[in-house]
Image (spheres, rainbow, N blue to C red):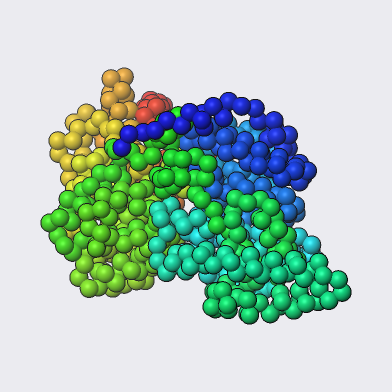
Amino acid sequence: MEKKKYSETGKHLETGESLLRQMHTPEDVKRLTQAQCLMLCKEIRSLLIKTVSDTGGHLASNLGTVELTVAMHRVFSSPEDKFIWDVGHQCYTHKLLTGRRAKFSTLRQENGISGFPKPNESPHDAFISGHSSTAISVACGMAEGMRLKGDTEHFAVAVVGDGALTGGLSYEGMNNAGKSGNNLIVILNDNDMSISRNVGGLAKYLTSMRSSEGYVRTKKAVERRLNRTAVIGPSVAKVIKNSKSVVRDALLQSATIFEDLGFVYLGPVDGHDIPALEEVLAAAKQYHRPVLVHVHTVKGKGYFPAEENPGEYHGVSKFDIETGNPEVSGKDSYSDVFGQELVRLAKQDARICAVTAAMEHGTGLHYFAKQFPERYYDVGIAEQHAVTFSAGLAATGYIPVFAVYSSFLQRAYDQLMHDVAIGKLHVVLGIDRAGVVGEDGETHHGLYDVSYLSSVPGAVIYAPSCYDELRLCLRRALYRDKGLACVRYPRGADQTAFDKTALNTEYTHVSGRRTDVLYIAYGRVYDALYRASLAAAEAGMPCDLLKLTRIFPLDKSTVQLAMSYRKVVFLEEAYYYGGISQMFGDLLLESGFSGSYRRVAPKAYLAQASIAAQLDKMGLSKTAIYRDIQRTYQQEAL
């Protein structure tokens, strides 16, 4: 499709940002007129588009919450009132209005400001949140803590997307919050999207509610009119407010699910109408009990390409504002290759099904969705359900493939252990974004799946080092393994240079360099090791290499192979504790290894930075590995 130019947007970006430059604290926002608020929102959108086009980030979700965030800061008083964002990537406007405009160009950059709320970055960031569906539970706890401290004036305010409501933790939070009686307000940011378009019964339910805006307009108009009536007005208005069923039943026919859970329900309200937002939020404060405010927004609001394709503009790399041409879905990535290979195999096998948790494009499953819609399942942001649903498919003879980001799979550990492994059901996991992921930082790294998956009895884990190996591992996981089979692969493209003439799904030993030093690695780290070893060999520091492909369970022959060396170093892009390198060391010790064994792997959370910088910090870049080989030889000389 031919790309359009959006010169009007580009021109607007060159205009002054006088109002935004005057916003140093949330108190400054309260002093603006409604006309100034509209201008402020235009300036904020312009800066969001410009900055994200330079740094990458979450664009569509932030464009959709500009007016809502402005209204929140005009009605509430942060940081005394606690704002909890779900998911936290929609907090960019909040950051701009809380003293971080001058640093906004460093968004998601190393030593810059985070793309998510961070309490150590600002007192206005009440809670760090990078995974969805957590905000209601957090707000419930914060509201209770405020009550225990005797603070009956301020509020815990959770901003929750309708996509996040598809996650079970949201319902656990609502179930407990509704009965609390505390100063808790949940703002449901309903834009009909998770990352992909929302699916399931909840999406249909919210759609029906959005079509019933007459209920709120009628109810509020009656209350306003009665409140202006002398003497009898306020008392009658109170009766109306406490007896909503007459108006509600006439327009909605039944109570909302939120009222059944104990919330006062207000909405739906136009999420881009600041006066309406301020009115409903101010009304919510008057109840001093749990209230849910239903706000309808447009994801990508104000930038045509993002409005037209909000899923593609959810998380973007740098892009051209004029053409609206982002680097969104790479045509050459591990995700892409995984998705295309799965389609190829599914053409030959009608048992193969594909499952995603609202990440159709991110995991490469959009190819499968197009080719086999009857065997494709988007379950929404519900990783636990995705795993157990896959177990159910497996129990009936199908081969489910659940493609999921490593970071998000963490939430489904119990289901893997209990629902898949005990029954020895054949479920295949495509674990995307394994390892560090760059600018999204701590909440999104895929460094922990190795530790917990290797604790699941009967699990098999593959870590391919290139595209061809990924294809091999996927086929083996589908057809040779029987229980839980996991194929983990990194974010980005295959740019490897190592020899691929003898690829397999077990291991590869590169030897014959007349050395007693062995370096072991798997996944993308192996290529960095390979490149570093070539440079080291030229400098007179040769080392043999061992590339693991099936990393768990470990092939015992690899341990016996390592026993013949005096120095063994294991490089691992996974958490230090519980990783494969720790298991390998244990097996060496049990086998009576008398040489030296060393492990290089991360032990702490890594803040946002480029993937290259993060790998270097962990000691896993080509340069860092070369230095490590140097140290190994220097120690040998001593």
Residue 196 appears left or right of 127:
left
What residue is shown at x 22% (from left), y 73% (from top)? 396
Quarter assignment of residue 508: top left
Give the percent coordinates (x, y) of residue 360: 35, 52
Q: Quadrant of the N terminus?
A: top left
Coordinates of residue 17 in the picture (x, y in percent): 65, 30
Determine whether, in the image, residue 485 is placed left or right of residue 64.
Answer: left
**Does residue 163 appear in the picture of this structure?**
yes
The x and y percentages for residue 579 are 39, 51
The correct choice, above or below, for 253 with respect to 605 in the image is below
The residue at the point 72 percent across, 63 percent down is 283
Left or right: 111, with 581 as reference point:
right
The residue positioned farthest toward the left in the image shown = 348
Q: Nearer the viewer, residue 322 or 358?
A: 322
Q: Residue at x 81, y 66 (%)?
A: 228
**Residue 151 or residue 423, whichever sits in front:** 151
Residue 622: quarter of image? top left
- Residue sticking out furthest to the top: 539
Quadrant position of the C terminus in the picture: top left
Residue 187 is situated, as x and y percent measured from the top left of the image, at 61, 60
Residue 597 visible in the picture: no
